[in-house]
Image (cartoon, helix red, strand yellow):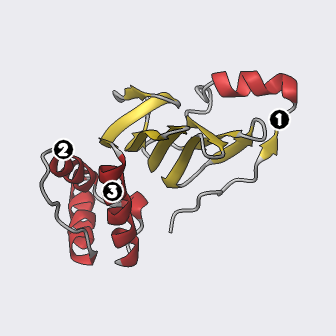
Amino acid sequence: MCALAAARPRDLVASDAAAAVGAPSAASGLTDVELTWIERRLERWIRFGRVAADRIVDRRTRVVSFRPVAVFAFVRWSSNDFGTVHSSIAILSAAAPRLPYSTYPFVRPGGELLLRIDGWPKVEKVLKAIDAIEAAGVDPCDVAPDHWRHIGSQLAAGLPFRPYGIDRHAAWLRRRAIES
């Protein structure tokens, strides 16, 4: 399984908090993701990913960083007094030097967008697909990028998507070995 807290968090003093949220890890080459949790109002969290660094900004906010091309899932959810207002999941490959990338909210500088789904029913299907991949004994961080794209396009079209198991993963590992 992916290690969500691979690095020991470093507390920041209040004067450094604003700088930490706004300053990407450009010098280090890492991709920063701002996570927030406000009970029953706002949640931004990582479903899977290998975290390279973790900084606590305040009680509700922390910033996790990923190495170049690391794959991670970023979930955003918000509500008001009447229920869920927004829910989405994005699976991104962290930005790498000299490679193109897309900007994405709360991800600095950005990454290659492999999947983006909005709306709780579809987000729930992606979360279940991630659970199924883990149940098959495959780390979601290592899944073929094409599979995430496949899930996104199939859900967008309202069609079922193929499951990802050990056989598919073995084929992906062989393909990656040949390409490199």
User: Which residue is at a point 39% across and 42% down the rendered structure image?
Assistant: 88
Q: Position of residue 32 (x, y in %)?
A: 57, 35
Taking the spot 27% from the left edge, 52% from the top edge, the residue there is 148
Disc 3 secondary structure class: helix
Q: Is residue 122 left or right of residue 76?
A: left
Left or right placement of residue 112 versus residue 3 in this view: left
The reply to whether discs 1 and 2 touch (Cβ–Cβ < 8 Å) is: no
- Callout 2: helix, strand or loop? helix
**Amino acid on which disc 3 is placed:** Val
Nearer to the camera, 124 or 138: 124
Q: Position of residue 56 (x, y in %)?
A: 75, 41
Q: Quadrant of residue 177?
A: bottom left
Q: Amino acid at mark 1?
A: Leu
Q: Which mark is residue 12?
A: 1
Q: CA distance from mark 1 to mark 2?
A: 41 Å
**Viewer-side label of 3, 1:** 3
In the picture of the structure, the residue carrying the numbered disc 2 is 156
Residue 100 placement: quadrant: top left
Whether pointer 3 and pointer 1 mark residues with C-beta atoms closer than 8 Å, the reply is no
